[in-house]
Image (cartoon, rainbow, N blue to C red):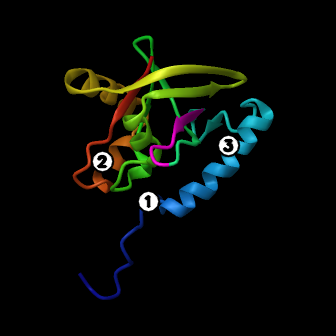
Amino acid sequence: MSDSSPPARRRWFIPWVPKPATMKRIGRLHIQLYQRTRGLLGGRADGLDIFLLTTTGRKSGLDRTVAIPYFRREGKLLTIASYGGNKVNPAWYVNLRANPSVRYQIGGQVRTGTARTTTGEERQRLWDSVAYEHPRFKRYLKWCGDREIPVVVIE
């Protein structure tokens, strides 16, 4: 190969894991838009259905709301604690592990539920179903280190 050969072609996708502070700022704006428009704005983002999930802060005891993707599989409402591929679990997930009672909003409807982390075959089946339809989640596995990305069902 000579020095005059053209540079290798770059892929259009550059892996980028948002920093927690960036995720927080984006999240606050998203929540405001979603709440003010009852999900008309913010109800879908980047090809994913979005809902507002409210947990109780494990230290503060205050309500903590996030705008995150949700999925319906096998008659279940679920979300994935991917945190964009970060190496740590998102705070909302740590909160619901301490207190699984949650409130969630889909569009204009607000409901309450109990969250549980799936395990074993159920987790793998639900993960595979979502990752097949949304390949970005497979990429997150490469970025998140040794962390197993939790799949959470809300009942």
Q: Amino acid at mark 2?
A: Leu
* Residue 38 percent location from the top left of the image: 75, 29
At x 32% / y 41%, what residue is drawn?
Answer: 149
139 horizontally vs 84: left or right: left
User: Horizontal and vertical percent for residue 69?
Assistant: 52, 35
Q: Which mark is residue 17?
A: 1
The first of marks 1 and 3 along the sequence is: 1
Looking at the image, residue 139 sits to the left or right of residue 56; the answer is left
Residue 31 circle label: 3
Quarter of the image containing the N terminus? Answer: bottom left
Q: Nearer the viewer, mark 2 or mark 3?
A: 3
Residue at image position (67%, 46%) is 30
Looking at the image, tell me whether mark 1 or mark 2 is earlier in sequence order: 1
Give x and y (percent) for residue 3: 30, 88
Above or below residue 66? Residue 85 is: below
Q: CA distance from mark 1 to mark 2?
A: 12 Å
Sort mark 3 into few (<14), some (14-19) or many (20+) by Cα contacts within 10 Å: many
Local crowd size for mark 2, using a 10 Å CA cut-off: few (<14), some (14–19), many (≥20): some
Classify mark 2: helix, strand or loop. Answer: helix
The secondary element bearing badge 3 is classed as helix
Q: Is residue 146 left or right of residue 110?
A: left
Badge 1 element: loop
Which residues are drawn in magenta? Answer: 52-59
**Image location of residue 14, percent across then percent down:** 44, 62
Q: Is residue 48 above or below residue 78?
A: below
Tell me where residue 33 sits by quadrant: top right
Residue type at mark 3 is: Ile
Q: Give the number of the disc on residue 141.
A: 2
The answer to which quarter of the image holds residue 46 is top right
Q: Nearer the viewer, residue 3 or 139?
A: 139
Residue sitting at x 67%, y 43% = 31
